[in-house]
Image: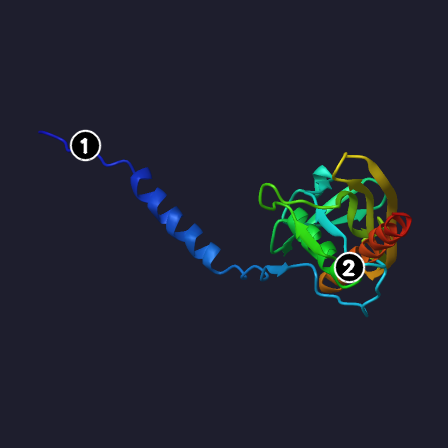
Amino acid sequence: MTMRPRTPKTRWVLPSAVIILTGCFSLGRNPPPVHYFVLGGVRQAQVRTVSRPSIAVGVRRLQLARYLETPFIAVRQGAQRITFSQYHRWGEDLGGGINRAVAGYLAARAPFAGLDVAPWPLGTNHDYLIQLDVLSFEGSAPEDPSAQQGEAHVQAMWEIIRQQDGEVVGQGTTDFRTRWTVGDYAGLVALLDAGLDALATDVATGLAKIDGER
């Protein structure tokens, strides 16, 4: 008598397991929506700080702290821990957004003969170049996860360079801090934007001093 080979039971168990797991995943809650933000939305009253509309300025590509080279908005917790929000992101390259916003705030403060943001066409001439080195651009919160009070922090070093000979003719550091409610990312972006406005004010003041000495 010939016996038929028996079909292994595991053949039938595995597909059933897949169906059960798929059903479980379908019952999960949808993830929160992702929110995207851009800079340059806060406009202060125009303050003319450059005495003559004869200066042509170029804002060079900035230097950005490596940990900020991400689309996720950063929050520093305590002294050394950096966290990134998966659901709150920059809607553009952060370095390019900072440059664009600073240039916009500069334009609101001074009647420049020309104001360009890198990259500009080859052969474009400027009286002065602005070089930014952004060291901090984030929220800051206590290590205690229940804490609600933190701050927004923008820190950047800046240089004013005479294009004709490459000499640094002005420099400074802007260190902007203001209170922030932890978890309010829309509020954080607005406060960081205000920090860029303060940075532009410092640079415009430096340009005004140089222009007055010419």
Count of picture labels: 2
Name the amino acid, label 1. Pro
User: Where residue 81 appears, x then y in whole percent?
Assistant: 78, 41
What residue sits right under mark 1 in the picture? 5
Dot 2: element: loop
- Based on the displayed image, in which of its 4 quarters is residue 200 positioned? bottom right
Q: Residue at x 87, y 45 (%)?
A: 173
The answer to the question of whether label 1 and label 2 lie on touching residues, with beta carbons closer than 8 A, is no
User: Where residue 47 appears, x then y in whole percent?
Assistant: 84, 66
**Left or right of 78 in this view: 118:** left
Q: Residue at x 70, y 65 (%)?
A: 41
Q: Residue at x 78, y 55 (%)?
A: 196
- Based on the displayed image, in which of its 4 quarters is residue 89 positioned? bottom right
**Residue 147 can be seen in this image:** no
Question: Mark 1 packing: few (<14 Cα in 10 Å), some, or many (20+)?
Answer: few
What residue sits right under mark 2 in the picture? 53
Dot 1: element: loop
Q: Is residue 40 positioned above or below 45 on the image?
A: above
Q: Nearer the viewer, residue 128 or 214?
A: 214
Question: Mark 2 packing: few (<14 Cα in 10 Å), some, or many (20+)?
Answer: few
Point out the tag, 1 or 2, that comes first from the N-terminus. 1
Coloration of the structure image = rainbow
